[in-house]
């Protein structure tokens, strides 16, 4: 990769803000550099550009960044590496190839690439304080990790996992006999000659890692894995009141119901993980077609899709963090499935999609599931799911970590990659220009249409491209008005421009050939957008967010007040213009032609 002025321009114009930080830093390394170093390392990695000032209040990327340059490159590079190898940070994960001195016109800028730290290295912290010196990246920038997040990273750095810890004062009496008996029956069917079949329950659990003895203290108890997998519901709730299990079927809903079937704790079943798994796995696949296939004289009912769904359910259980507050949620949707578990991703997404392996967060549970035929191959989970979905020509599964909610979500859509009704809608909306686009642009628009929005990171995973390539494509589609950008802090979401026909009408009236209307045309489009949106009363904040206008005061002064004076908008509290709870609503008699 050629790291030069053009690369910097592309990064500033098209890169994803969540993985990009600019700092003026003309003479010295700012203190905030080390907070960003920690946050990038602990989250998804990113690039820090020294010698560039970013005005975040400016919407236009061409005016948002000012290259100020750095005055002494050699000194700054030495300072960075001297500090990295001092007690300022706990680990140095940067090498010489990660720091680039770039000539930018008559100036120099420094590009520092911070990789995502390996799960064995995290947390990366500063100032010798693991709690107060650990940072993570979110949509607004760098922020302090909570004590719970730091403890989770410390646990994850140990390959022995979380589920082998002893749960004091919980013993074999806290095991639900029926659950364990059902598991042992399945175990015997899969392993008929196994020596463990002859052991009593305590020895059986001891060998599987569900029970543990401390030889030094003579203490013995259930492990986290043993209690959560096979325990009595009351015992589990007493010790792990931070975790909930929830299955919701949102298919075939009738009337005002919010679901057609639900499994959560209701006192009618022992809510351990094995019961949860066995009760819902058949519910998930009951509607999946099973083609008639014979293996010799035996019918084979399993398909790659059935296996993929079970793999997703198994992965959710063995990778969840049961020591934080959260819910294991499975949703069966009319067009797919959603799996949610508390915790974070131990590996970068790119590695997970390729089948990269790490020790499961719960290796004892992983062994328990593997011994009865689930989750056979370490690292094969996501590739198995991707392969099954690709063969069906369904939309690519979406796996992502929600940093703010401290949970991982896997969405499996059973919708065709670009359904005909979706392509017909887009072709009609964009006046047959949709089919003239390249395949990548069509996929992006179809995804935004089907999922309601698309982001730079979603585009990367969808097309297997880097942030700059993703940003360029999204920018081009925004330039030709097929996508509309919605900026929230450093995060940008893109939506299909449902007002495209209106844009074309304005363009035709102006007799323009360019892809963008002139300033008057842009103003006309924005006004029409406000009037349409306010057919139901909306607040100033809602309107600003909808039209992508960051300066609410200016929006109110230049547009809303004018529309009120023209009797096109009205106030829900007309007697007090600046009243708390004030909203704007379209006056119907003045908007019939809009």
Image (spheres, rainbow, N blue to C red):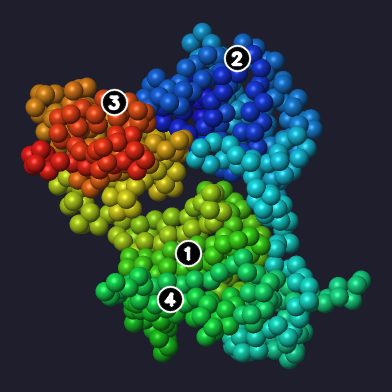
Query: Between disc 1 and disc 3, whose residue precedes?
Result: 1
Foreground mark, 2 or 4, reads 4
Left or right for 325, reference 544 = right
Mark 2 to mark 4 CA distance (whole Å): 59 Å
Q: Is residue 512 visible?
A: yes
- Mark 3 lies on a secondary structure that is helix
* Quadrant in the rendering for residue 515: top left
Q: Which residue is mark 2?
A: 26
Circles 1 and 3 in contact, beta carbons < 8 Å: no
Q: Residues within 10 Å of mark 1 (few under 14, many from 20)?
A: many
Query: Between disc 1 and disc 4, whose residue precedes?
Result: 4
Q: Which residue is mark 4?
A: 262
Q: Which residue is mark 3?
A: 557
Mark 1 to mark 4 CA distance (whole Å): 15 Å
Mark 3 to mark 4 CA distance (whole Å): 50 Å
Residue at 54% in and 49% down:
403
Q: Residues within 10 Å of mark 3 (few under 14, many from 20)?
A: few
Q: Position of residue 447 (x, y in %)?
A: 32, 50
Query: Between disc 1 and disc 2, whose residue precedes?
Result: 2
Which label number is shown at residue 299? none
Q: Position of residue 407 (x, y in %)?
A: 54, 56
Q: Which residue is mark 1?
A: 339
Left or right for 71, reference 279 = right
Return the residue nearer the eye: 579 or 277. Answer: 579
Circles 1 and 2 in contact, beta carbons < 8 Å: no
Mark 1 to mark 3 CA distance (whole Å): 46 Å
Return the residue nearer the eye: 300 or 514. Answer: 514
């Amino acid at each position: 990769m050629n790291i030069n002025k053009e690369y910097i321009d592309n990064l500033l114009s098209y890169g994803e803000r969540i993985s990009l930080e600019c700092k003026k830093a003309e003479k010295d390394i700012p203190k905030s550099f080390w907070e960003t170093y920690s946050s990038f390392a602990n989250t998804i990695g990113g690039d820090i550009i020294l010698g560039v000032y970013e005005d975040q209040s400016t919407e236009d990327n061409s005016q948002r960044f000012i290259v100020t340059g750095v005055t002494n490159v050699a000194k700054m590079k030495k300072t960075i590496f001297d500090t990295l190898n001092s007690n300022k940070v706990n680990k140095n994960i940067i090498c010489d190839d990660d720091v680039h001195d770039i000539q930018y016109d008559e100036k120099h800028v420094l590009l520092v690439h911070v990789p995502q730290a390996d799960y064995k290295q995290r947390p990366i912290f500063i100032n010798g304080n693991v709690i107060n010196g650990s940072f993570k990246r979110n949509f607004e920038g760098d922020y302090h990790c909570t004590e719970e997040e730091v403890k989770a990273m410390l646990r994850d750095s140990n390959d022995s996992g979380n589920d082998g810890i002893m749960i004091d004062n919980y013993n074999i009496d806290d095991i639900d006999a029926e659950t364990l008996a059902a598991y042992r029956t399945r175990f015997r069917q899969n392993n008929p000659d196994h020596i463990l079949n002859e052991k009593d329950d305590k020895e059986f659990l001891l060998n599987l890692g569900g029970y543990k003895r401390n030889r030094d203290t003579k203490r013995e108890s259930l492990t986290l894995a043993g209690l959560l997998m096979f325990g009595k519901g009351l015992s589990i709730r007493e010790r792990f009141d931070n975790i909930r299990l929830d299955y919701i079927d949102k298919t075939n809903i009738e009337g005002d119901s919010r679901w057609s079937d639900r499994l959560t704790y209701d006192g009618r079943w022992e809510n351990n993980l094995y019961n949860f798994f066995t009760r819902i796995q058949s519910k998930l696949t009951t509607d999946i077609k099973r083609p008639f296939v014979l293996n010799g004289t035996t019918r084979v009912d399993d398909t790659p899709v059935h296996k993929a769904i079970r793999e997703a359910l198994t992965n959710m259980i063995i990778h969840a963090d049961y020591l934080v507050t959260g819910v294991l949620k499975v949703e069966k949707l009319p067009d797919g499935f959603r799996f949610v578990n508390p915790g974070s991703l131990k590996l970068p997404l790119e590695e997970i999609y390729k089948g990269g392996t790490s020790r499961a967060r719960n290796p004892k549970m992983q062994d328990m599931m593997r011994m009865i035929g689930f989750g056979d191959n370490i690292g094969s989970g996501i590739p198995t799911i991707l392969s099954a979905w690709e063969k069906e020509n369904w939309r690519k599964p979406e796996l992502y970590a929600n940093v703010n909610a401290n949970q991982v979500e896997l969405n499996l859509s059973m919708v065709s990659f670009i359904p005909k009704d979706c392509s017909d809608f887009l072709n009609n909306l964009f006046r047959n220009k949709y089919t003239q686009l390249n395949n990548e642009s069509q996929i992006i628009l179809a995804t935004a249409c089907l999922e309601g929005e698309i982001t730079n990171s979603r585009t990367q995973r969808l097309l297997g491209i880097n942030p700059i390539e993703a940003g360029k494509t999204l920018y081009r589609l925004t330039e030709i008005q097929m996508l509309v950008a919605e900026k929230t802090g450093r995060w940008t979401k893109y939506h299909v421009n449902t007002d495209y026909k209106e844009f074309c009408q304005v363009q035709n009236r102006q007799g323009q050939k360019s892809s963008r209307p002139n300033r008057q045309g842009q103003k006309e489009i924005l006004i029409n957008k406000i009037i349409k949106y306010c057919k139901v009363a909306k607040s100033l904040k809602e309107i600003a967010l909808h039209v992508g206008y960051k300066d609410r005061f200016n929006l109110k002064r230049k547009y809303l007040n004018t529309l009120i004076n023209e009797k096109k908008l009205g106030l829900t509290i007309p007697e007090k213009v600046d009243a708390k709870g004030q909203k704007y609503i379209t006056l119907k008699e003045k908007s019939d032609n809009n």
